[in-house]
Amino acid sequence: MRKLIWTLAVIAPMIGSAARAEDTIKLGYIDPLSGGGASVGEGGLKTFQYLAEEINAKGGILGRKVEIVPFDNKTNPQETLVQAQKAIDAGVRYITQGNGSSVGLALEDFVTKYNTRNPGKEVLYFNYAAVDPAMTNEKCSYWHFRWDASSDIKMEALTNYIKDVASIKKVYLINQDYSFGQSVRSDARKMLTAKRPDVQIVGDELHPLLKVTDFSPYIAKIKASGADSVITGNWGQDIALLLKAAADAGLKVNWYTYYAGGAGGPTAIKQTGLDHQVFQLTEGFANSGHQPAMDYEKAFRAKVNMSLWYPRAVNEMRMFKAAAEKANSVEPVKVAAALEDLKLEVLDGGTGFMRKDDHQFFQPIYISSFGKLAANEPFDEENTGWGWHLVTKVDTPQAMVSTTCKMTRP
Amino acid sequence: MVHECAVLELIVISSLNGVLFGMLLFLLSSGLTVIFSMMGVLNFAHASFYMLGAFFGFQLTKWIGFWPAFVLAPLLVGAIGMVVERYGLRNTHKHGHVAELLLTFGLAFAIEEIVSMIWGRSPVDYRVPALLDFPAFTIFSTNYPAYKIFMLAVSVVIFVALLLVLKRTRVGLIVQAALTHPHMVGHLGHNVGRVFMVVFGVGSALAGLAGVIAGPALVTQSDMAASLGPILFVVIVFGGLGSLPGAFVASLVIGLVQTFAVALNGSLASVFGPLDSPGGPSALSDIWNVTIAQVAPIIPYLLLVIILIVRPMGLMGTRES
């Protein structure tokens, strides 16, 4: 009798999980859950878990529930490949990843090779934040889809804005020393020289990725350069600590950033006292004024207790569902085909589409600034009382770049 | 004129930052180097005690406020250090140095895992106490935070206290003697075991103190030990194993070098002119254009290699081994 109970106790959970595995669609979330990238990685995980619950509450995708399976890659490309293999062994056919283009490039290459070697067991890579242009240009892959605007799209939008701001005269570039940071730096140099030849680039810094714990030496250098504006693609703790060091030193410049809205960023900006002098480029933000998005933000905050950093993750999951329904299948090969040229009404309003040529999603881009809130702006960030305010919206046609991608199709 | 001011400002601020980082390194390396010369064991877990200090500081601050935490957390870490020496190292001592080394090595991993189990792997919100959260003074137009001045003051006080204890007290004399002639001290009838335990405890407590004060200024997370550990070894080898003045000088040198390296823009290209390669960018032109700021993180290790070649006993070390 006792033996029987033991046997049941061991076998019963196995049966349960086996049955569940048949039904669910497993989405492997491979991002940093430890180390310097952990704060953003955990935020991303909560976001995807919320989105999965939302889809499941409405009946799932083609009647099947979505399950988010987290894997910690420590923002390390080698570790990512180990985790990706682990994910595939656990039955994952869809992988989503965002933090770190060095990681993204390794994963894109891995998935492409895996799919070539394992026909019939294809895996798709949904990219929600790795924005190195190479991923949809010279290194593009049929199995990779990107919902975030690539860094050259963002720089195109940013420099189009800077072009008309006469007060910007001396610009300092500070970026993380890896593929993405280097692309931000070279795009900024190229586009600024073309659009505003009178602007002087007084500094061009690359620092180690997610390793610096005190940015005050860098801030002292920015100060000494006499810059009036800083452009940075920094994310995670690298933007939060950079702004924190600026706040401590009392550095007064305009900040043009890709990711100042991430964990710790808003708190640091409030400390600097730079009211509407820190700018951010996103595909959407809390106070965008688009009612459905603002309602969504409210519900999200109430449940998850953080701001919706990734409206693109919402777009990604909605489009995943739409593509699966269009293909009437959750088989990755069919979903991939259905995603090509698929159009979507994006969360913050307007139409976006997944370009067939390079699998880059094009969508409206917003430039917003952080500071005191106006009457019609209900959302603040990190309990600072300050929030994001619309500066300008760049529509989809103006936020497009060409591609050199020549992908191999199955 | 404006430009000259800016350069002067950069130098002053970088010096302050460099000295601050150097003093923090000294709090850690002083304990490590004394423990090494007494016991012949390179304590791999030393940086982990620093991390424990930061997390204890964070937790105690949440419960009872920063100031009690500032006193209690280092004591707690010191107590843990003593327990490790008494029940860990002393038992493995008879099996030789390799066993002791492996013990501290394993301990470092165990502490990291335990810390991330309790507090998670992402940074904890360890803030500067409100009392010290204001700019202490303004040089030219840069504010210098009061908390950093506080860190500097604590490090200097500890440094002076350590110096007085070692040079002016009987305990200090025994410790100094044990540094160079541990067996002789034992033969003279001193309880070397207890001296070891106390020194290990004090060394750990100093590391813990460094953690408590560095936690709010830097980032308190479970990989902080792993990222600081290697630099510590550079400091004690560079300064000379077992030499306190050596550790002091090396800490300041490493602190200043790392800070000033960031401030410099020079590259091989700016010294020798751009490299004209007919085939476009190559691996060589990449190296040519790397700035000193970019290689700042590896400069300490480069110094380590150079000092080992030129002067294997370190800057102020007296014995090789």
Image: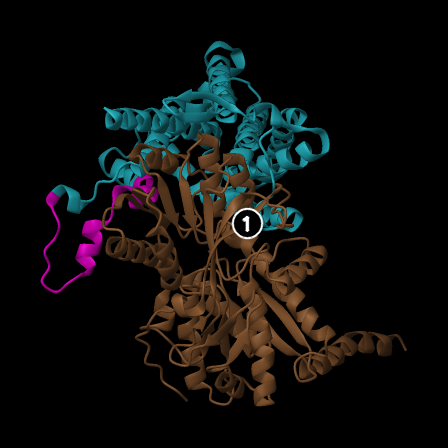
Chain colours: A brown, B cyan
Q: Is residue B165 above or below residue A9?
A: above
Residue A268 image position (x, y, % from top left): 52, 40
Q: Is residue B165 above or below residue A320?
A: above
Q: Number of callouts in the render?
A: 1
* Magenta stretch contains residue B286: yes
Residue A112 image position (x, y, % from top left): 41, 79
* Magenta stretch contains residue B207: no
Question: Which portion, as a residue range, is magenta?
Answer: B272-301
Three-letter amino acid code at the position of disc 1: Trp
Quarter of the figure that contains the N terminus of chain A: bottom right
Residue ID for mark 1: A388
Q: Is any atom of residue B121 visible in this view?
A: yes
A327 left or right of A108?
right
**Dominant secondary structure, magenta:** helix
Q: Is residue A71 above or below residue B179?
A: below
Disc 1 on helix, strand or loop?
strand
Residue A321 image position (x, y, % from top left): 60, 79
Chain assignment, label 1: A
Q: Write the residue at 33% across / 77% down.
A: A405
Q: Nearer the viewer, residue B67 or A376?
A: A376
Q: Is residue B113 above or below residue A277?
A: below
Q: Is any atom of residue B316 visible in this view?
A: no
A307 left or right of B230?
right
Q: Nearer the viewer, residue A148 or A48?
A: A148
Q: Nearer the viewer, residue A319 or A110?
A: A319
Disc 1 crowd, CA 10 A, few/some/many (<14, 14-19, 20+):
many
Give the quarter of the image for residue A326.
bottom right
Give the quarter of the image for residue B80.
top right
